Image (spheres, grey):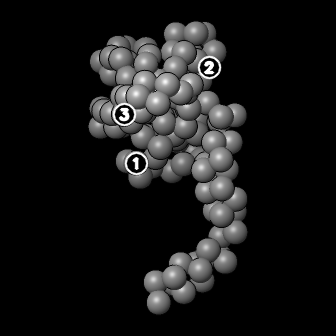
């Protein structure tokens, strides 16, 4: 019964299936794991994705990733959420805690399995 409800809903929003597929194939944010983690963490507070989350993740990309200040998961897990530049991008401390926790967990897996980001 739950599957029927979900299938019916998914037919109303066909773009969601493509979005989910791209996320699972790491095609969001051009495969940038830091940006995908931030996307998920910022989305977790329930704000409008297209009006708030995407522009903020893009701002982070411009100001921190493109400039080389944040180069990978290790840098993300060590971000100081009280840093004034970071706060200009995203003030929600809960989101930063989630992002840092995800990054830390992924770094642990990466080290255990000797993987790249």
SS under mark 3 = helix
Q: Residue at x 65, y 76 (%)?
A: 12
Describe the element under mark 1 as helix, strand or loop.
loop
Mark sitting on residue 96: none
| Residue shown at the point (42%, 33%) measured from the top left | 109
Name which of mark 2 and mark 1 comes first in the sequence: 1
Q: Is residue 12 left or right of residue 45?
A: right
Q: Give coordinates of residue 87: x percent, y percent.
A: 38, 22
Looking at the picture, tell me which residue is in the foreground, 101 or 50.
Answer: 101
Q: Which residue is mark 3?
A: 105
Above or below, 11 relative to 84:
below
Q: Residue at x 70, y 59 (%)?
A: 18
Name the quarter where the C terminus is drawn: top right
Query: Percent x, y for residue 93?
Result: 30, 32
Left or right: 62 as drawn, with respect to 34? right
52 lies left or right of 94? right
Front tag of 2 and 3: 3
Residue 101 visible in the current orientation: yes
State the mark number for residue 62.
2
Residue assigned mark 1: 44
């Amino acid at each position: 019964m739950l599957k029927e409800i979900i299938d019916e809903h998914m037919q109303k929003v066909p773009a969601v299936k493509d979005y989910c597929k791209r996320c699972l194939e790491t095609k969001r944010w051009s495969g940038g794991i830091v940006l995908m983690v931030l996307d998920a963490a910022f989305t977790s507070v329930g704000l409008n994705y297209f009006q708030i989350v995407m522009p903020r993740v893009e701002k982070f990309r411009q100001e921190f990733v493109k400039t080389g200040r944040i180069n990978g998961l290790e840098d993300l897990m060590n971000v100081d959420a009280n840093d004034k530049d970071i706060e200009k991008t995203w003030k929600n401390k809960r989101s930063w805690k989630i992002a840092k926790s995800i990054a830390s967990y992924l770094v642990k897996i990466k080290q255990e399995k000797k993987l790249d980001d």
